[in-house]
Image: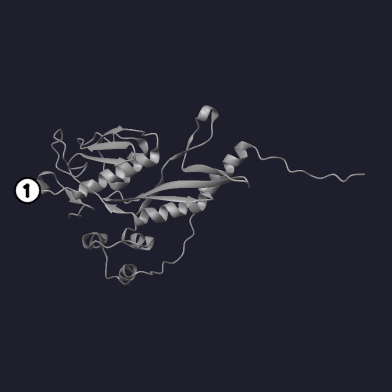
């Protein structure tokens, strides 16, 4: 008489989705930071106490621990760059973008994640992470975002607003990535972030409260849209400004100075 072999039942799609949701909420491992670069040792010893000193001298940030020490109130968020499988190609937006490579052994799956970090006061960073699993891709994206932190120039360049405070950008700029073009324009106080949702997350973490925007190209590719936004934010600091316009437009580089 033949022995009966217990064959495991196949896992249904809702159960797989629940497993992925649990993986996404796994906390990152916490370890003590041991600096390896000269800049990291200077930050660890207290010789550099402000991140503006790094930007003013043009140093390259090669360790995420430097940003963690100088910006302790940093916030993290994951952008919805992927899409779950659905009927007729439509599905719910997800934080990871899944790709497959056909091989003789089968399909090799990789996950790509886009993370954004910022302190809502003039500093923001974008990073990408790719791995065979979701958790390593998420952690890699957060580390890369800290290495790509930039200083944002803010101001009040809207002719509709009489308030002189850095709630928006000082002038219009345009960024590009691939076929995507995005134009950022100053908006009056109280208007809000009139921009795509994922771009609004980046601008909110950068400390910008009001803005107009205009996009063109294949904006459905969220990765290109986000990097076009970062290109526009970088161009804010590349424009030369006359000294008399700094007070007129309430231009601020980085964080706002605390006043008594």
Q: Which residue is mark 1?
A: 244
Does residue 61 appear to the left or right of 88 in the view shown? Answer: left
User: In the figure, 71 relative to 250: above or below?
Assistant: below
Left or right, 8 with reference to 139: right
Q: Is residue 205 above or below residue 218?
A: below
* Residue 174, x across and y down, in percent: 24, 39
Relative image position of residue 245 (x, y in whole percent): 9, 46
**Which residue lies most toward the front here?**
104
- Viewer-nearest residue: 115 or 69: 115
Left or right relative to 31: residue 69: left
Q: Secondary structure at mark 1?
A: helix
Q: Is residue 211 visible?
A: no
Numbered marks: total: 1
Which residue is nearer to you in this view: 105 or 36?
A: 105
Residue 234, compared with residue 84, is above or below; it is below
Q: Position of residue 146 (x, y in %)?
A: 36, 55
| Label 1: how many Cα within 10 Å (few below 14, some 14–19, many 20+) | few
Quadrant containing the C terminus is bottom left
Horizontal and vertical percent position of residue 73: 34, 55
Residue drawn at x 44%, y 67% as measured from the top left:
32
Residue at horizontal 40%, vertical 47%?
77
Q: Nearer the viewer, residue 53 or 90?
A: 90
């Amino acid at each position: 008489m033949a022995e009966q072999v217990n064959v495991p039942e196949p896992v249904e799609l809702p159960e797989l989705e629940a497993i992925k949701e649990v993986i996404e909420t796994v906390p990152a491992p916490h370890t003590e930071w041991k600096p390896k670069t000269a800049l990291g040792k200077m930050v660890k010893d207290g010789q550099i106490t402000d991140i503006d000193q790094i930007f003013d001298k043009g140093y390259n940030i090669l360790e995420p621990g430097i940003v963690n020490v100088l910006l302790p109130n940093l916030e993290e968020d994951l952008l919805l760059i992927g899409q779950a499988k659905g009927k007729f190609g439509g599905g719910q937006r997800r934080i990871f973008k899944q790709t497959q490579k056909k091989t003789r052994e089968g399909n090799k799956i990789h996950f790509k994640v886009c993370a954004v970090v910022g302190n809502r006061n003039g500093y923001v960073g974008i990073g990408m992470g790719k791995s065979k699993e979701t958790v390593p891709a998420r952690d890699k994206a957060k580390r890369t975002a800290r290495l790509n932190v930039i200083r944002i120039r803010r101001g009040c360049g809207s002719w509709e607003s009489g308030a002189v405070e850095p709630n928006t950008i000082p002038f219009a700029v345009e960024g590009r990535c691939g076929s995507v073009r995005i134009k950022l324009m100053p908006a009056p106080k109280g208007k809000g972030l009139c921009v795509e949702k994922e771009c609004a997350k980046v601008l909110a973490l950068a400390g910008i409260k009001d803005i107009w925007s205009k996009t063109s190209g294949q904006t459905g590719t969220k990765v290109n849209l986000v990097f076009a936004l970062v290109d526009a934010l970088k161009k804010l600091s590349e424009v030369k400004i006359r000294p008399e316009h700094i007070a007129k437009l309430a231009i601020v580089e980085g964080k706002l100075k605390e006043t008594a």
